[in-house]
Image (cartoon, helix red, strand yellow):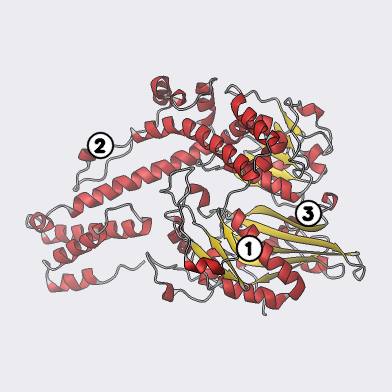
Amino acid sequence: MALRGSEEVEEQMEEAEHSEDRELRVSPAEEMPADGPGEEEPEQLLLPWDRFSAWLHCICVVGFDLELGQAVEKTSICYLSFPDSNSGCLGDTQFCFRFRQAAGRKSSLGCFLDHFDRDAPVCLKKDQGHFYGYVYFRQVRDKSLKRGYFQKSLVLISKRPYVAFFHSLLKLIAPEYFEKQEPCLEAACNDIDRWSTPSPGKILTLPIMGVVMKVLRIPTCYDKPGTSQLVLSTPSDSLVSIVLPTIHEVDLFRCFYPVFFHIQMLWELVLLGEALVVMAPSPAESSDTVLALVSCVAPLRYCSDFRPYFTIHDSEFKEYTTRTQAPPSVILGVTNPFFAKTLQHWPHIIRIGDMKQTGEMAKQMKVKKLKNLKTLDSKPGVYTAYKPFLNKDEEIIKQLQKGVQQKRPSAAQNAILRRYFLELTQSFIIPLERYVASLMPLQKSICPWKSPPQLKPFVQDEFMKTLEKAGPQLTSRLKGDWIGLYRQFLKSPNFDGWFRNRRKEMTQKLEALHLEALCDEDLQLRIQKHTEVETVDLVLKLKDKLTQAEREQLPVRAGTLAKLQTHIESVILTLPEDLQGILHKPVSP
């Protein structure tokens, strides 16, 4: 199998520092054409490796090589693909990392992935500026090797945050690869290139290396948060080996168990985009905890940077550990003891112990002072001087503790905690949604022959006044300084990202309503009063509207674009033949 590298990995290899003694090989993800498929692209028009590229950017194999390592290795991907030496990860370990896409480069997938993102919830849209790395690391004793150990990682690089799915996929591919080497990897790549594309709302049955994975359903942005769609079994299910109820969710209760007395405070810290570092004994625990923190504010999208597994070799190491300025809005997951000293000045530090001992009752823990955190061996807990805005919710703590005592299934505990976070976030977001909806102009103010009206500006004081009668107290039992929490949130990257997204959606809705109003007009009657020049100008403007609607996938009524195209054709036919020929020519990009 000829293994060829993707442009992104090659660039990282050129930019990053030399590693100690690791080797990297990359399997193929063919370059996407610059112009991805249009709307409702027929499957038969997809090129070889298009389907593969819809799921993965590339596959990397990372291993130690005492002789060739430094001559070959040049990328931080290699460091991120191996646990720190102090982690002592014998056997098989799975974890996740995230790294920046090189500045000035666009993913070769381009609008191909945008096509699938249209109906995806915000937390499952492709990551614009980062890649995810999903790792399966194996370390076993082998006396035949100089190091005395076999150490190798299989890494899937993707733009998609499908954590549960890719970890399950690696459990199938990696053990086979370690036994049978490259032919096995080639077979897996060919299988993936025959998969259906990951469209929201689809139930997927995915054959891979002789077994069948079934993804019950990829969520859509239209799903009610916290609900799951009923999926009926089919006769073909008898061939399914693995069923995945979720494509992206982590086990929140298992991740938060070591510090679950402080889950509400952690929710506030994540909501406000505070600088957080998770110190854990292994990359698996570090990455799971960071991903759990990011997902605890769902359906709100966490808009700051987060690194499930961060090492001293990361290209952002100096940027994130400098003491010359305040720590950035980022969540880091680390395992190297060096960080206990390097990140001492960070305001919020979570020390995670061994997650495997979840059968015992977690002890009541007070928030610890930062000066008490000396080394990575410090006791598990939350080290911060932060004082929460909201009063502590004792009911959820008692409910989870009771579940531990009664040996309630982990899935049930996870569902309880996920529901708690969802309701807390929704109680907080609903007043913001209600106020932002009031910024939308009335539909009757939309005139087809004038530009669409503008949204009203977001005025913080006006919003704060609405909280007196329509605040979170309508849906949440929690008391406390909600006003203070909102004031702090409005300064955060999460508010900025959320409001930008809502403003974009509302602006597109206004454009769609304006387009629909144009389509309802009698254009033939209108152009009777126009000169020839004015009619040509109208055609050009309508064509621009049609192009914009297709490019931005505006939420117009079914049939609107076809109706507009018909209007354009009918107006062109009223013009002289020479002008008709010019206007029928496609607009050059």
| Within-10-Å neighbours for mark 1: few <14, some 14–19, many 20+ | some
Location of residue 67 (image quadrant): bottom right
Return the residue at label 2: 442
Q: Which secondary structure lies at badge 2?
A: loop
Pick whichever, 551 or 258, lies toward us: 258
Image position of 274 with respect to 158: above or below: above
| Within-10-Å neighbours for mark 3: few <14, some 14–19, many 20+ | many
Q: Mark 2 or mark 1, which is nearer the start of the sequence? A: 1
Locate residue 470, reporting x and y percent: 40, 24
Q: Mark 1 or mark 3, which is nearer the start of the sequence? A: 3
Seen from this angle, which residue lies furthest bottom?
1
Return the residue at label 3: 83
User: Do we see residue 393 in this rendering?
Assistant: no
Locate residue 218, reporting x and y percent: 49, 56
Q: Mark 2 or mark 3, which is nearer the start of the sequence? A: 3
Return the residue at label 1: 169
